[in-house]
Amino acid sequence: MRAMQLQHIAPIESSPLRAVELPDPIPGPGELRVRVKCCAICRTDLHVIEGDLPAAKMPVIPGHQVVGVVDALGPGCSHFKPGDRAGIAWLRHTDGICKYCKTGRENLCPNSLYTGYHADGGYAQFAVVPEDFAYAIPDVFSDVEAAPLLCAGIIGYRAMLRSEIRPGGNLALYGFGSSAHVVLQLARHRGCEVYVVTRGENHRQFARELGAKWAGDDAAGMPVKADAAILFAPAGTLVPPALAALDRGGVLALAGIHMSPIPPLDYDTYLFQERDIHPVTANTRGDGRELLAEAAQVPVRPHVVTYPLSEANHALQDMKADRIDGTGVLMVDDAG
């Protein structure tokens, strides 16, 4: 199979992903193999490639927002059959026996494993996943529409849960990339007014087009105090102004898997009056199923920019430079 493989940690500007030919993977017991149609790119891919996350598997094929068709089943599979559409997301294994798994918090499992990090992912013609961690894709979504939902959507959904935003409330979003543009659509469907803080005028205009009540480059300019906020940008320096823009009792959810250092917080200014900070760590499979169901009901329409698989380095460079409105999606040619 053809794949784009990371062989050593390096800045994405150096185009570290290499086109390689590898044997087709063989699914083991309880696993299914997906012939990949497309794979959305994600900032977590950048964190893996550039070493913001400790190296796990190396070399590794990145990619954890995978949509394709099941073409082979390992022994013991019973939920999917060949020809079914299936999605592969970031979370791919939990131990099922720890106190977190037993209490509905498998996202905190200390023995969890992740696609495109501990195991090869979707920047390839084929990908293998445990059947219990694969997702059925609702018919309302095309392949390219479904791909961004498998991480950007799922993590955005969990961040909304962690923000405790209520229907009809005021929600502030910091950064307006792949996750945020999905969350805006979910929040508007729930009757929320959405306020977006982001640096790029193109992103601000895109947010307005999707229904944002206000979009600007400085939280101090927001016309109202937010009931809840989600910080998508991996910049710890934004935590204090985001807290300052919250109303009493407001919650700030931190959605990133990696963030630069957070400055010291003055208690009276930023935390008093019961303002809370709720970090987000991965997701549960329940989050994924709930997100796909709600997104299908809206329906959420992710805005995508497509690239051929061979242009994976270029796509990630565009994402890092904020040149993509919505989500970049790699199209995998499975003809040969």
Image (tube, rainbow, N blue to C red):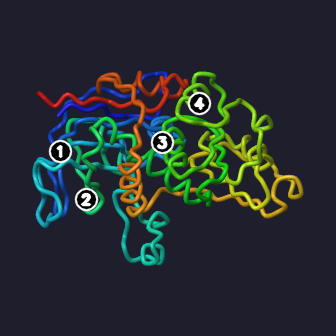
Which disc number belongs to residue 182? 3
Secondary structure, mark 1, is strand
Secondary structure, mark 4, is helix
Query: Looking at the image, which residue is at 28% across and 50% down?
Result: 138
Q: Decide which of tag 2 and tag 4 comes sooner along the chain.
A: 2
64, above or below 160, in the image: above
Image spot of residue 16 (x, y percent): 41, 27
Secondary structure, mark 3, is helix
Q: Are marks 1 and 3 in contact (CB under 8 Å)?
A: no
How many other residues sit within 10 Å of disc 3, few (<14), some (14-19) or many (≥20)?
Answer: many
Q: Nearer the viewer, mark 1 or mark 3?
A: 3
Which disc number belongs to residue 69? 1
Q: From mark 1 to mark 2, how far is it between C-alphas?
A: 15 Å
Amino acid identity at mark 2: Pro
Image spot of residue 177 (x, y percent): 53, 35
Q: Is residue 71 left or right of residue 275?
A: left
Q: Nearer the viewer, mark 4 or mark 3?
A: 4
Q: What is the quadrant of residue 333 in the picture?
A: top left
How many other residues sit within 10 Å of disc 1, few (<14), some (14-19) or many (≥20)?
Answer: some
Q: Nearer the viewer, mark 2 or mark 4?
A: 4
Which disc number belongs to residue 130? 2
Question: What is the tally of numbered marks visible in this picture?
Answer: 4
